[in-house]
């Protein structure tokens, strides 16, 4: 959650041009600094087989797990030339483009053939008015990939290492007040073995991408102000730190630690007020401290407690949020303020109980998320992050592991508000370096991740290990020790990480993989609860997994994927509560440097279109709205006559052309042994492998095919409560356009992007799943198509990515294809 300052009086307005317009004086403000940037780049075109050659890196540094020595050029990269004129000389003859953040420097194709690397330059000119002299002015970057060098008014300011965590530039003493000022950022997105994750992108199972791909903020405060937790650099301190104790539905205590710094040259006297505000905007409790003094150039930690009667507790099923407003007051007037969204809740984890949330048992049924979009990589808007979370929540997923790096703050905000538990991860993937610099950077990532994210109620586990990387147990215990030092109490704080038969001090280790998903356990930690952090992909074939199925592979392929996940999830539940739950790999399809194809492991594809497995998990939602879904296209000659229906109902009736074929209870057949999941001969979905599921599927055998309508009706306690119908399509006739807004309309912020889908339908409007027509897209209005404009349909749907401009108004999208009626849609923003 972004800690947003309250703006008192009228705050300044950022304009696209070089000037910054201000109104009257104010005490503090935080505003997005995303518009008015200029951009230029230099791409490195390395050898395809060893694309790191242009940096002089030898083949030895690509060792998957261990590097004893660091090439001189890698160490030098951390301290290379900081002369701005030298940097600009590299751009001679290149044009600067106008861009809005978040922004990808090197857009990627789909699939990614060869990940793009190079230097990206961003600059922004803005005016700092004279009435801000005496204020503190900071520019904060949420994330930029991945070694950043910053200049302000031509002077080198700092270098930041790592692409996934924030950094700030204090311009208080650098700004020219009353004049234009220019900030320049150089970004090098190449892998560096001293900077986690560290692995070269052509060996990586994801992509680093490029650019200033998250929000930038301009913060203006008084010299007496609440600090930023990441820049304060205080163990278990800095900023605002909220913890909870004695949590129940009757009463809870909210403990608040606030770090306040006085950057003036004389002592300041003030009081600190805490207000707890509910969703209705009502202050439910407030407390003001006694008068506090802090000397010049000093800081102070203030601790306060609020005891709330009958609190609205946060949980995934009831994600109740409060706003904690923290206000510095002098002579009864506000001088600085920050809002922190919090959720009052307790976590308790043990082998005996599993996970308890607010004292109640909770079983995790989750997945993993990489944050990339096609074409724009990780440069997602706040709305795009929310749309992802919204779709994930609809699928019934109650927990996400943020693989394998800290993700955008807006995504955590969305999960807080929607009720999705999170496993927060530091950057790392199958790579370890013995260099003290690398080790120091790992520890710094741990500290910065916890300091940034510690107030989010959704975070249940802190993954402080380097994913699938096996340094010594001593080093991993040091990682755990650093993490624990950032939390003043043990309450509600649990670390997690890989063990694999080597004890490494984690509170909640991941399972020991022994080759048999039917026997998931953690014998290394017999007294600890554990989490199954990935399942459904590797154990069914890895890179050639039978779980890696695209929508274009057809019904039988998607059923195979869904059955693999069902088969294993059913067995994983047997380990509960010793195992607190399991997480599929993964929710969305992915792109990776190590392969030139789309990795189709997801419950939804790269364009966020659900597969059959998505609906299996939706049917597992407990105490949810009734649903029915037929995992069948009902096509002559190709659709399975074994019809699978996913539903959370008590009973399902199946009809063909309104004639009842069968009525069935949920599947209750035997569990098949390991190995049949790999079988392509029809064994999946035999009516078993469901004994432990919340809602087993309904398997209808030998359904007689007849062209027309296949309908399923779900019943609860004898009453029809849900239905779903698929139709045998006729010939493709028209294009039907729709926007995938997922409860967040397109915003006129210059960076928001939504998927526009062209569905091919017949004369009756039924989707033609076999259609693969090439669709041409065009638009009018203030927006741009960032994907190719000509897209071939996959399983009857072609998708483009539409990015908004800065003007409010209407955007019209047109889709045409030979032999099909044109599709038109109008979008307001």
Image (cartoon, rainbow, N blue to C red):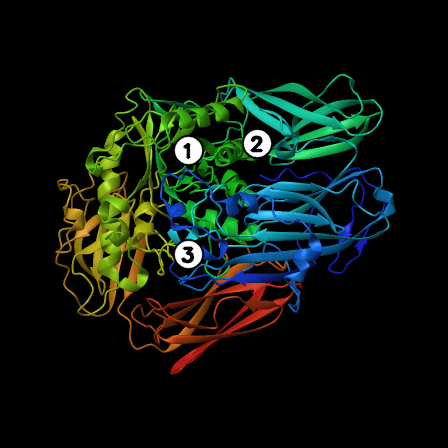
Residue density around tag 3, few if under 14, some if 14–19, many if 20 or more, within 10 Å: many
Q: Which residue in the protein does label 3 denote? A: 608
In the picture, the quarter occupied by the N terminus is top right
Tell me where residue 67 sits by quadrant.
top left
In the picture, the quarter occupied by the C terminus is bottom right
Q: Is residue 298 visible?
A: yes
Q: Secondary structure at mark 3?
A: loop
Label ID, residue 465: 1
On screen, 418 above or below 248? below
Mark 2–mark 1 Cα distance, whole angstroms, equals: 17 Å
Q: Is residue 322 visible?
A: no
Q: Nearer the viewer, residue 391 or 44?
A: 44
On screen, 800 above or below 235? below
Label ID, residue 451: 2
Mark earlier in primary sequence (2, 1): 2
- Identified at 79% across, 23% down, the residue is 270
Q: Is residue 206 left or right of residue 284?
A: left
Residue density around tag 2, few if under 14, some if 14–19, many if 20 or more, within 10 Å: many
Whether the residues at callouts 3 and 2 have beta carbons within 8 Å, the answer is no
Q: Is residue 375 left or right of residue 368?
A: right
Mark 1–mark 3 Cα distance, whole angstroms, equals: 29 Å
Q: Nearer the viewer, residue 667 or 497?
A: 497
Counting from the top left corner in percent of width and height, residue 13 is at 76, 52
Residue density around tag 1, few if under 14, some if 14–19, many if 20 or more, within 10 Å: many
Mark earlier in primary sequence (1, 3): 1
Give the farthest residue toward the bottom.
819
Counting from the top left corner in percent of width and height, residue 500 is at 29, 31
Of marks 2 and 1, the one in the foreground:
1
On screen, 141 above or below 752? above
Label ID, residue 686: none
- Identified at 57% across, 62% down, the residue is 42
Q: Secondary structure at mark 1?
A: loop
């Amino acid at each position: 959650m972004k800690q947003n300052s309250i703006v008192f009086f009228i705050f300044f307005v950022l304009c696209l041009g070089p000037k910054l317009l201000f109104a009257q004086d104010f005490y503090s403000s935080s505003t997005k600094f995303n518009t008015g940037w200029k951009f230029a780049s230099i791409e490195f075109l390395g050898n395809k087989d060893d694309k790191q050659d242009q940096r002089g890196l030898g083949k030895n540094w690509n060792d998957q797990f261990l590097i004893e020595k660091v090439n001189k050029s890698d160490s030098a990269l951390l301290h290379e030339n900081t002369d701005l004129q030298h940097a600009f000389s590299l751009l001679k003859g290149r044009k600067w483009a106008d861009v809005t953040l978040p922004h990808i420097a090197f857009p990627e194709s789909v699939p990614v053939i060869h990940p793009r690397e190079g230097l990206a330059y961003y600059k922004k000119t803005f005016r700092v008015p004279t009435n801000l002299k005496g204020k503190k002015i900071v520019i904060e970057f949420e994330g930029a990939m991945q070694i950043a060098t910053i200049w302000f008014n031509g002077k080198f300011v700092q270098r930041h290492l790592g692409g996934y965590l924030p950094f700030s530039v204090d311009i208080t003493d650098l700004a020219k007040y009353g004049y234009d000022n220019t900030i320049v950022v150089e970004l090098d997105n190449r892998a560096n073995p001293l900077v986690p994750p560290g692995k070269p992108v052509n060996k990586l199972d994801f992509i680093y991408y490029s650019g200033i791909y998250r929000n930038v903020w301009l913060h203006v405060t008084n010299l007496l102000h609440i600090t930023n937790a990441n820049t304060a650099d205080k163990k278990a301190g800095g900023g605002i730190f909220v913890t909870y104790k004695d949590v129940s539905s009757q009463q809870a205590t909210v403990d608040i630690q606030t770090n306040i710094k006085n950057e003036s040259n004389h002592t300041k006297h003030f009081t600190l007020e805490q207000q707890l505000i509910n969703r209705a905007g009502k202050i439910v409790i407030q407390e003001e401290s006694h008068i506090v003094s802090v000397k010049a150039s000093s800081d102070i930690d203030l601790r306060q407690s609020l005891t709330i009667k009958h609190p609205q507790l946060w949980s995934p099923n009831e994600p109740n949020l409060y706003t904690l407003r923290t206000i510095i007051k002098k002579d009864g007037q506000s001088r600085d303020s920050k809002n922190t969204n919090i959720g009052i809740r307790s976590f308790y984890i043990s082998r005996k109980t599993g996970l308890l949330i607010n004292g109640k048992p909770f079983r995790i049924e989750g997945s993993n998320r990489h944050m990339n979009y096609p074409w724009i990589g990780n440069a997602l808007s706040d709305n795009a992050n929310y749309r992802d979370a919204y779709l994930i929540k609809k699928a019934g997923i109650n927990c996400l592991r943020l693989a394998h790096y800290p993700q955008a703050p807006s995504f955590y905000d969305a999960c807080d508000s929607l009720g999705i538990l999170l496993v927060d991860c530091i950057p790392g993937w199958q790579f370890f370096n013995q260099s003290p610099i690398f080790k120091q950077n790992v520890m710094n990532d741990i500290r910065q991740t916890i300091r940034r994210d510690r107030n989010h109620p959704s975070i249940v586990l802190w993954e402080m290990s380097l994913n699938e990387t096996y340094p010594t147990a001593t080093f991993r215990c040091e990682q755990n020790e650093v993490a624990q030092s950032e939390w003043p109490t043990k309450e509600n704080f649990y670390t997690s990480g890989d063990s694999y038969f080597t004890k490494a001090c984690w509170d909640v280790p991941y399972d020991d993989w022994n080759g048999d998903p039917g026997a998931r356990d953690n014998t290394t930690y017999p007294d600890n609860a554990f989490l199954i952090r990935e399942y459904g992909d590797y154990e069914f074939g890895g890179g050639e997994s039978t779980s890696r199925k695209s929508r274009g592979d057809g019904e039988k392929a998607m059923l195979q994927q869904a059955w693999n996940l069902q088969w294993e999830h059913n067995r994983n539940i047997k380990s509960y509560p010793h195992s607190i739950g399991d997480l599929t790999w993964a929710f969305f399809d992915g792109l990776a440097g190590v392969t030139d194809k789309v990795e189709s492991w997801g419950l939804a594809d790269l364009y966020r279109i659900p597969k059959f497995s998505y609906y299996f998990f939706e049917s597992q939602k407990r105490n949810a709205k009734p649903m029915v879904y037929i995992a069948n296209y009902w096509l002559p000659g190709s659709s399975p006559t074994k019809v699978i229906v996913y539903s959370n109902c008590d009973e399902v009736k199946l009809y063909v052309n309104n004639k009842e074929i069968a009525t069935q209870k949920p599947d209750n057949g035997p569990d098949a042994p390991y190995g049949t999941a790999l079988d392509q001969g029809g064994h999946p979905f035999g009516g078993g492998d469901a004994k432990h599921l919340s809602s087993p599927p309904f398997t209808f055998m030998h359904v007689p095919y007849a062209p027309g309508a296949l309908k399923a009706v779900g019943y609860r306690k004898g009453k029809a409560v849900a239905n779903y119908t698929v139709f045998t399509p006729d010939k493709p006739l028209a294009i039907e356009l729709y926007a995938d807004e997922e409860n967040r309309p397109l915003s006129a912020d210059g960076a928001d992007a939504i998927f526009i889908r062209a569905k091919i339908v017949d004369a009756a409007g039924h989707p033609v799943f076999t259609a693969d027509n090439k669709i041409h897209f065009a638009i009018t209005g203030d927006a741009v198509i960032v994907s190719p404009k000509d897209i071939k349909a996959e399983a009857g749907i072609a998708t483009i990515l539409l990015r908004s401009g800065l003007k409010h108004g209407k955007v019209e999208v047109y889709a045409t294809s030979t032999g099909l009626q044109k599709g038109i849609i109008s979008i307001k923003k």
